[in-house]
Every structure is written in structure tokens, then in C-alpha cells.
Image (tube, helix red, strand yellow):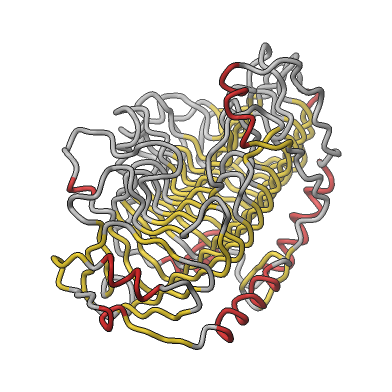
Amino acid sequence: MFKWDNNHHPINNSRLIDMLLGSGGRLEEITRETQRVFNEIRKPVEAGPEKTRRTIKEGIWSPISTKFTAPDNKNIGFEVEDDNIFPNWKKELDREYARLKELNTTAVSVTDFGARGDGRTDSTAAFTKAFGSGGNVVFVPEGVYVVRGLKLPSWTRLIGAGTGKTIIRLHEKAPKRRTLLANRNPFKGNSHISVEGLTLDWNVERLPVHTKTASGNNLSSCLTFAKVRFGWVKDVDAINPGLHCFDISSSFYSYAGDGTKAKGGSSFIWLDRVTGSGFGDDGVTTHHSDHIFISNSHFRDPSGRSHRAGFANSNGFEIDDGSTNVWLADNSSSRCFGGVEIKAHDTSSAASGVHISGHLSVNDNRAFNFRHIGHHHPGDAESRSAFNISAQKLVAIHPVRSELYRNSSPRALVVSGYRNVAVNQFLFAGDPGYDYKNQPVASIQFRAQNVALANGHIQGFGSCSTDLSVATGQKNVRHVLLRNIISRNSSPMGIDCGQDVSSIKMENMIRLE
């Protein structure tokens, strides 16, 4: 079985993905090809009727919520420079980062205010004094700094000596609900905050071994940006958080129903070269926020301890409730429940307008999982928000069963309930010696519509039932395009078309032994 050690550096992701796909030097061409495939299957967003009655739970959350309509994205909106791809709005992020560097002229060290990197001294007060009211570049020299939770004001750069060298650790007596690093005012909001070159240790070892590690909402994480406009996290490692390594969020999560989103989301945030492990829920997650860019990052080996044992929906990358205009580029994940999950809870709007360019999933249970919970089955209300995902250069290596979620069968890809989904240039590689227990490799199911899989290879899933399961039928999957897909030494059936083959358009499907 293919395994990945703990020393993988995500800066190598782009090269590894290109090597596995055989697509080096073709990034702009592939992206234009993805745009054409997306245009071919895309239909305009039609949200459908609003609910006439709210549940009690939805009514409770409604005061902190607002109406939400999924953006009707027609163009992916990309720019390519050499081997790098960016959303076209990254220029605004770059301009604001230049402003932050230009205006932050006061540089201080936390040691000047009494902080000690000895792994014992409580340095919370020293950090707070160094931050002041904002406007400072705050350096943290090499060492282990113990704090009870830090609040970053606007217009602040927090810079360490590098991951593994500068470590900020949560105090032994900090409560479970404490976030290690957050913006100072999640209600009024903050802007222009950058965290760079350090390790964040939530210190889960301070809690009893068998307790759940999270306390609700967006608390109990290593880093939370809540209602932050213009934020950067670069070269930061986050370990063993009770909930998330990085949470790009609203002030509160909201569950006021599909067609709503929380007020006070974050916007224009870039996470680059961030890593994490041991997380109780997800490595990085986004909620009710927009214009988020996550690149060259890697998450592995969650603990799943914020969930009940055996039911841990712990993903490396989770793009969740009400998130829009989110870009993922050249990331990787290993041994998570989901490598990348784009989703929503049943009482929230789905993430929409999400674009992936390059992801390497190794030994995740469900490498790529796109779903709107509670809007799947014929008796469910159709999702009003689950629209528009484009993905390219996806690599799933040896998906396997996981103790995180014991009843979940391994899959390279699942699409449920989403409409307008284009996946172009992919490799799904199974372990020929692994028992996949007669399950499909990839599934398009539960009312998904307008879905395309193009230019891909599937191999090594000999013990699966079928390479592609497309669950067509009344009130189920409709309008699927399968194009230029090669199945090599894989399952005995290439495609299970369900009840209505007329809903599937197939072009150049090849099986090789």
C-alpha cells in the first residue's frame, strides 16, 4: 500500500501532481480546457422556492443571518504566471499586503516586553503589550512561548523565526473553548492581519485523553479569523487543535436554513504554505466567507476527537456553509476522512463558486467529497445553493477505509446534490492488493446535476464493483458528461449508468487490461 511519511513539504505539490498526471508545462492550456468543459455543462443558477416555514432551530439562528443566493459564476477567473495559478482578485490582496508592509513602520520584539521562549513562562501579557492597538510588526524569536490565548488587532504582522523554531503554545490551564490565536474583535471586525513563520501548538495534551476536544462554534482552534477583511497566513504549522488548525469564518456559525448565511464573514484571505496535523475536526475550514485563497498547503492525520469515535468527519480541507469564491491550488492531504470536502449542513447554504487547481490526496477515505447534507434524497428539498464547482488536476492515490469514519467506504470522488460541477484532468489510482469490498471508485449520486468528468485515468481498483457509478433515475442524477476517460487494470465494470442512460453523454471511454 502507498504510504506517505510525515515529512512531506507542500511546496513540492505542483511538481508531484504534474509528474503523476504527465501534465507539466500545460497549466494555462489545462485551465482553459476546464473552462470549456464547465461552460458545456453549466446551466444558470435557479435557486427554487424559499421555505414557507422555518424550523425552531432556523428561527433561533435567523437574527445573525442574512439572505444568500449562490453566485451565478460563468467564468472561473484565473491568471497564470509560469507554473502558478491565481484567482484574478489576488491582485487586490497583493496591493493590500504592500500597504500593510508600507504603513507598519514600528518593529518590536515580544522579548522587549518580557516574553520568554523557555516553554514555561506565561508570556500572554508581553504579547498583548507588543501588539498594542495595532500598527506594529511584532517579531517572535526562536523559542517556545506559552500563552493563554492571543488577540491580534488590525494592521498587525506577527512574524516568527520559522516553523519548528518559533512555537506558540497554549497554556496548560487554558479552557477547552480557548482559541490560541484570533483577531481581536470578531463582532466589529478587523482588517490587515498577517501571521508568518511559526508553529501554533494548541496543546491538546492538557485535556483528558478520552474527552471531546471542541466546545462549539469556531472556538478551540489554533487560528481563527472571524470577520477579518484582508488577512494572510504564510508558513505556519498548526498542531493538535481541539477543532480546526485554521478557521476562516464568520463571527458565529449560522444554521438559519438553506438560502441564508451568517452575517460578519471574512473576506480576502490568503493561506499559503500552511500545514497541520492532529486536528479534532478539519485542517482548514471556511464558513460564510468569501474570496479565500489556499495554496501549497498540506494537512494530515486528524485525531477526530471533536466527534464521536468512529463518526469523525475530519477533512484536510473543508469548504463549508455559505462560503463563496474559494480557490484551492496545489494542496495535499493524507489519512483524513476527506481530502477536500465542499459541503454544507442541511440547515445552511452550501459552499458555491469553488475552484480547485491541483490536489494530491493520499490514503484519505474520500479523496474528493462534494455534498449538501439533507438535500440528497427524493423526499428532501432540493438545494437552493449547491452550485458551481470547477476542479482540475485532481490526484487520488489509494483511498482506504478509516477508523475516523468506520462505516464509510473508500471513494476517489463523490458528487451529491451539487449542480454545475466540472472535473478535468484527473488520476484515480487504487491499490491492486487492497480489498475495496465491491464498492464503486467514484460516485455521482443523490440528485447531482450538470456534472462533467473529462480527461482522466482510473487504475488499480480490481476489487471495486465499478469505476464510475452514475445513479440516474427519477428525481436523481441528470445531465452527466463523461469524456476521454481511460480505465486500466481496474474494476470489472467501467460505468454503472443507473436507470436512465439517456441522462449520460459518453465520449471516448477506453478500457485497457
The percent coordinates of residue 401 (x first, y second) are: 36, 33
Q: Is residue 495 visible?
A: no
Q: Which residue is at 35% across, 37% downward?
A: 215
User: In which image quadrant can residue 52 be found?
Assistant: top right
Left/right placement of residue 142 relative to residue 285 reads left
**Observer-nearest residue: 447 or 55?**
55
Q: Establish if 175 lies above or below 271.
A: above
Q: Which residue is at 59% across, 37% downward?
A: 370
**Observer-nearest residue: 113 or 51?**
113
User: In which image quadrant can residue 495 be found?
Assistant: top right
Left/right placement of residue 245 relative to residue 321 reads left
The percent coordinates of residue 87 (x first, y second) are: 69, 64
The C terminus is located in which quarter?
Answer: top right
**Observer-nearest residue: 240 or 57?**
57
Q: Which residue is at 77% across, 35% downward?
A: 450
Q: Residue furthest toward the top? A: 379
Number of marks in picture: 0
Left/right placement of residue 427 relative to residue 50 reads left
**Observer-nearest residue: 75 or 2?**
75
Q: Is residue 48 visible?
A: yes
Q: Establish if 326 lies above or below 478.
A: below
Q: Establish if 445 lies above or below 131.
A: above
User: In which image quadrant can residue 107 be found?
Assistant: bottom left
The percent coordinates of residue 409 (x first, y second) are: 43, 28
The percent coordinates of residue 341 (x first, y second) are: 53, 41
